[in-house]
Image (cartoon, rainbow, N blue to C red):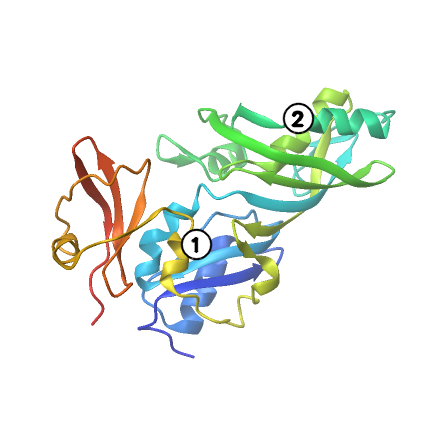
Amino acid sequence: MSLGSVEGLLLVDKPSGITSHDVVAMVRRATQAKKVGHAGTLDPMATGLLVLGLGRATRLLRFLGDLPKTYEGTFRLGVETTTLDAEGDVTGESRVAVTDAEIARAMAAKLGGSWQRPPAFSAVKVGGRKLYDAARRGELLRAEPRSVTVDRFEPVARNGVDVDFIAVVSGGTYVRVLAADVGSALGCGAHLRRLRRTAIGSFIVSNASPPETVGDVIPIERAVEHLPRLELEPEEARVARDGSILGPAGIQGPYAVFDPAGSLVGIYRDDGPKARPEVVLARLG
């Protein structure tokens, strides 16, 4: 199957045991597309939704980063690991004597905005080095805390020390850190046993395909459907395609600009008395 000249989004259901980069490589081979990227990494252990971009859509993937992400998973109380998930070495074990109500309260305490430090075993870079590379060498690198928002984090079932949950969080949130924080709050420790991403904004995993079976290509405009939309006059669209500055639209944050025919021109952002392009999409062909 060759989609080399096709652009748009692909929804992929990532299996456990491979990286998000592996998925990109598989799709690139399957489609022969020159440019393939993804919006939002999943750890190798995790499964579920990856949104991939083909062609010009790769330039728009960063605007999906702020969309809320929905997960379902399981954490285990009483066991702590180096990686905060089931792939790490056990660093501590404790007796678990907590009630369901105590678990629910500890999880509810994570709701809202806060600062979260990326875990040592993560792909975040410090000084050009990935944290997990340093951690595997026994070196401790610490990334700066980042602002995260947890809109939903609640238990849905419990089987002894294992707690099934649903979480809805902002982009960049580490769910395994949330699980470990709950264990710390309960005094027994915890680690993530299972994680599956079921949605990114309006994109849902039930519409996704395995990486080896390329599904339907979604129009490029879906990558910006969550942004404010502005339709340009013909002359404005012409100069915008050259990356020219426009008059302000009075819109907070980035917004998508379209020509009169409904084609996406790019992404602009107001900067005082001017509107400056953040992304300009070159014409196809």
Q: Which residue is mark 2?
A: 181
Amino acid type of disc 1? His
Quarter holding the C terminus is bottom left
Residue type (three-letter) at the residue carrying disc 2: Asp
Q: Is residue 194 visible to the viewer in this orientation of the structure?
A: no
- Dot 2, crowdedness within 10 Å: few (<14), some or many (≥20)? many
Which residue is labeled 1 in the image? 38
Neighbour tally class for label 1: few under 14, some 14-19, many 20 plus, Cα within 10 Å: many
At a point 47% along the width and 47% down the height, the residue shown is 40
Q: Could you say where residue 136 lies in the image, as x and y percent from the top left? A: 53, 36
- Image quarter where the N terminus lies is bottom left
Give the alpha-carbon distance from disc 1 to disc 2, as whole Å: 28 Å
Residue visible at 13% across and 44% down? Answer: 245
Indicate the quadrant where residue 248 lies.
top left
Looking at the picture, tell me which residue is in the foreground, 9 or 177.
9
Q: Report which quarter residue 66 is drawn in.
A: top left
Q: Secondary structure under badge 1?
A: strand
Please give the name of the residue rendered at 30% of the width and 73% of the height, measured from the top-left corner.
Answer: 5
Counting from the top left corner in percent of width and height, residue 182 is at: 70, 27
Residue lying at the far bottom in this picture: please name it. 1
| Image position of 7 (left or right of 73) | left
What is the count of numbered marks?
2
